[in-house]
Image (cartoon, helix red, strand yellow):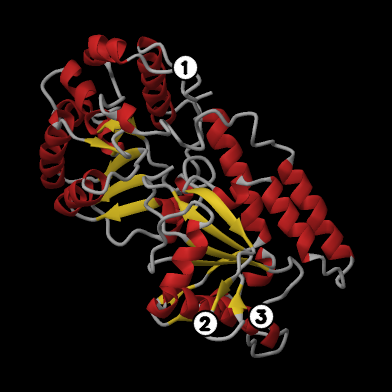
């Protein structure tokens, strides 16, 4: 899920994000943090509304009365706005909107000071989330956050029922029905029908497509590499990824190109990343160059003073130098556009993301700072994804579509 967090505390400790990881987000990158109400509103107006990006919910974490007063103004604007978001699929006024303030749970007088009546309180926010003192996981049941998201999904289902259509577009929308019943819509925007692929989200209609056993298949593959360090079948990993497209696409991407050749302007040389992932129009992410290396590749030497292994540095350079230089060069844009057009893709931004799937988490731990330095290339940083992270991604996405999905 994609989250806007408005926090009075600055900066947030890294452990803070544990509350949501694995249940509501894949990683802390899924949370956009703003430390003032004004900057949060700017993000909503300049990005979510103006660029029609997707957001799943908003949380306000604060303690002081002065911050509360600013949030009241934001809440008033949010609940009265007529704007839509997420490529005009949803009403921004209906987005789930939570408070995180333990004092408000404990002190009833402080809680009731928000608004003068119970009906007005429930109109403005979807509930108060209790923040664990040790930032442990909130969980996906028996809490305000989970029930608030369930409520939003129930309203979406009711909107679809009122329009006599289904979430996957099997039944055509009758525009006469839309005209007669649009006033009843709770979360759907009355403009959503303009999208050729309505509700094109991983959490819609995928409960049976993301199989829980995929996690076991990845573990089985990892054991093969652990038991045989000379095992070098990278193509087997490619097959696993293409057979389980959610591992590549996640919530952000709609298409993956596999081993596509892109030629230099002179000669017959070309670059060929393992995958290129293309983002949904509503996604806050960037298009992604995605390279695959083996799970039994190590990152650092086992010496008294660790250093990055030469082989690992070559892999880092392949992504951070070779791919980055090619795809960010304007000289190659005509070639890139031509090759992508053959695949039905009209755009590719020079502002893309670099990712490398390689190695295991236990090898990265303890050498994080050293490895991170080796992954920085100018203004870009290669995102290192270990195979343990890949299992975490699968488990998160399986829960996303089964627990908080529309099926």
Instruction: State the mark number for residue 171.
Output: 1
Spot occupied by residue 270 in the image (x, y as percentages of width and height): 60, 77
Labels 1 and 2: the sequence-earlier one? 1
Labels 3 and 1: the sequence-earlier one? 1
Which of the pair 331/62 is nearer the observer? 331
Which of the pair 376/205 is nearer the observer? 205
- Where is residue 180, by image quadrant? top left
- Where is residue 395, by image quadrant? top right
Spot occupied by residue 321 in the image (x, y as percentages of width and height): 52, 82
Judging by the rendered image, the residue that carries numbered circle 3 is 312
| Circle 2 crowding by C-alpha within 10 Å: few under 14, some 14–19, many from 20 | some
Instruction: State the mark number for residue 321.
Output: 2
Q: Which is in the foreground here, disc 3 or disc 1?
A: 1
- Left/right of residue 285 with respect to residue 301 in the rendered view: left
Q: Residue at x 73, y 65 (%)?
A: 295
- Left/right of residue 141 with respect to residue 211 in the rendered view: left
193 versus 50 height, above or below: above
């Amino acid at each position: 899920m994609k989250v806007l967090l408005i926090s009075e505390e600055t900066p947030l400790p890294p452990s803070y994000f544990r509350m949501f990881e694995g249940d509501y987000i894949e990683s802390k990158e899924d949370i956009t943090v703003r430390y003032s109400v004004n900057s949060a509103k700017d993000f909503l107006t300049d990005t979510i509304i103006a660029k029609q990006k997707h957001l799943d919910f908003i949380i306000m974490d604060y303690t002081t009365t002065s911050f509360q007063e600013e949030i009241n103004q934001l809440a008033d604007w949010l609940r009265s706005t007529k704007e839509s978001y997420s490529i005009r699929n949803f009403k921004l006024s209906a987005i789930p909107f939570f408070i995180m303030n333990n004092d408000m749970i404990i002190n009833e007088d402080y809680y009731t000071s928000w608004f003068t009546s119970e009906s007005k309180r429930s109109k403005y926010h979807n509930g108060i989330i209790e923040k664990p003192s040790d930032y442990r996981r909130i969980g996906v049941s028996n809490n305000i956050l989970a029930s608030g998201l369930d409520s939003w999904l129930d309203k979406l289902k009711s909107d679809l029922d009122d329009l006599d259509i289904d979430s996957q577009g099997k039944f055509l929308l009758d525009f006469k029905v839309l005209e007669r019943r649009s006033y009843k819509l709770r979360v759907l925007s009355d403009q959503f029908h303009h999208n050729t692929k309505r509700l094109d989200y991983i959490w819609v209609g995928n409960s049976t497509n993301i199989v829980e056993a995929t996690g076991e298949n990845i573990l089985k593959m990892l054991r093969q590499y652990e038991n045989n360090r000379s095992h070098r079948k990278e193509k087997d990993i490619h097959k696993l990824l293409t057979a389980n497209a959610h591992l590549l696409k996640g919530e952000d991407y709609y298409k993956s190109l596999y081993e596509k050749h892109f030629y230099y302007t002179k000669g017959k040389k070309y670059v060929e990343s393992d995958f290129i992932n293309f983002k949904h129009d509503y996604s806050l992410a960037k298009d992604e160059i995605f390279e695959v290396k083996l799970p039994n590749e190590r990152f650092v030497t086992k010496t008294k003073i660790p250093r990055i292994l030469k082989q690992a540095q070559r892999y880092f350079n392949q992504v951070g130098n070779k791919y980055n230089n090619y795809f960010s060069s304007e000289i190659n844009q005509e070639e890139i556009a031509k090759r992508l057009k053959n695949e039905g893709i009209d755009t590719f931004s020079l502002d893309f993301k670099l990712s490398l799937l390689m190695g295991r988490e236990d090898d990265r731990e303890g050498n994080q700072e050293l490895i991170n330095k080796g992954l920085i290339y100018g203004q870009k940083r290669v995102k290192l994804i270990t195979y343990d992270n890949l299992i975490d991604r699968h488990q998160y996405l399986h829960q996303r579509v089964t627990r908080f999905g529309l099926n």
